[in-house]
């Protein structure tokens, strides 16, 4: 329901405030989109903690992308 630009901006502002963020990502495409935004921010030296909610269904390639990121997956 969020554009990639809006999602990236919210994550960025939250992390710049020193706060962790929790995002509901129902489905493998949603999870992949969020992980891609986190990778993009990390390349710009912006990082923080992410709680990925509803992470029951994540593609193997997305899991591999998450390896060096501070992401906690929550199963519902």
Image: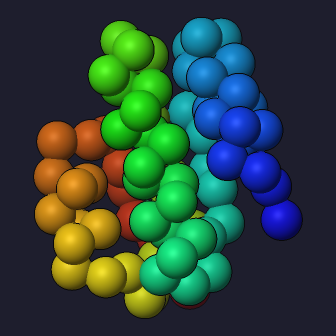
Q: Is residue 10 left or right of residue 29?
A: right
Count of numbered labels shown in the rendering: 0
Q: Residue at x 52, y 60 (%)?
A: 33
Front position in the image: 68 or 18: 68
- Which quarter of the picture shows residue 46? top left
Q: Is residue 75 left or right of residue 13?
A: left
- Which quarter of the picture shows residue 19? top right
Q: Residue at x 21, y 80 (%)?
A: 60
- Give the color scheme: rainbow, by chain, secondary structure or one colour: rainbow
Q: Is residue 13 above or below residue 48?
A: above
Q: Is residue 29 above or below residue 65?
A: below
Q: Residue at x 42, y 49 (%)?
A: 36
Residue 32 x, y percent position in the rendering: 44, 65
Tell me the quarter of the image containing the C terminus. Answer: bottom right
Residue 44 x, y percent position in the rendering: 39, 14
Residue 49 x, y percent position in the rendering: 44, 35
Q: Is residue 13 left or right of residue 61?
A: right
Front position in the image: 36 or 73: 36
Can residue 17 be seen in the rendering of this structure?
yes
Q: Residue at x 80, y 55 (%)?
A: 2
Front position in the image: 19 or 62: 62
Taking the view exactly as shown, the residue that stands out farthest to the right is 1
Can residue 47 be seen in the rendering of this structure?
no
Tell me the quarter of the image containing the N terminus. Answer: bottom right
Residue 22 x, y percent position in the rendering: 62, 50
Q: Is residue 29 left or right of residue 64?
A: right
Q: Is residue 63 above or below residue 16?
A: below
Q: Is residue 48 above or below residue 55?
A: above
- Which quarter of the picture shows residue 58? bottom left
């Amino acid at each position: 329901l969020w554009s990639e630009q809006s999602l990236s901006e919210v994550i960025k502002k939250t992390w710049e405030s020193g706060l962790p963020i929790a995002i509901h990502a129902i489905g493998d495409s949603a999870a992949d989109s969020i992980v891609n935004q986190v990778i993009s921010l990390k390349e710009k030296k912006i990082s923080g903690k992410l709680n990925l909610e509803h992470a029951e269904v994540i593609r193997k390639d997305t899991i591999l992308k998450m390896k060096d990121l501070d992401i906690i997956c929550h199963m519902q």
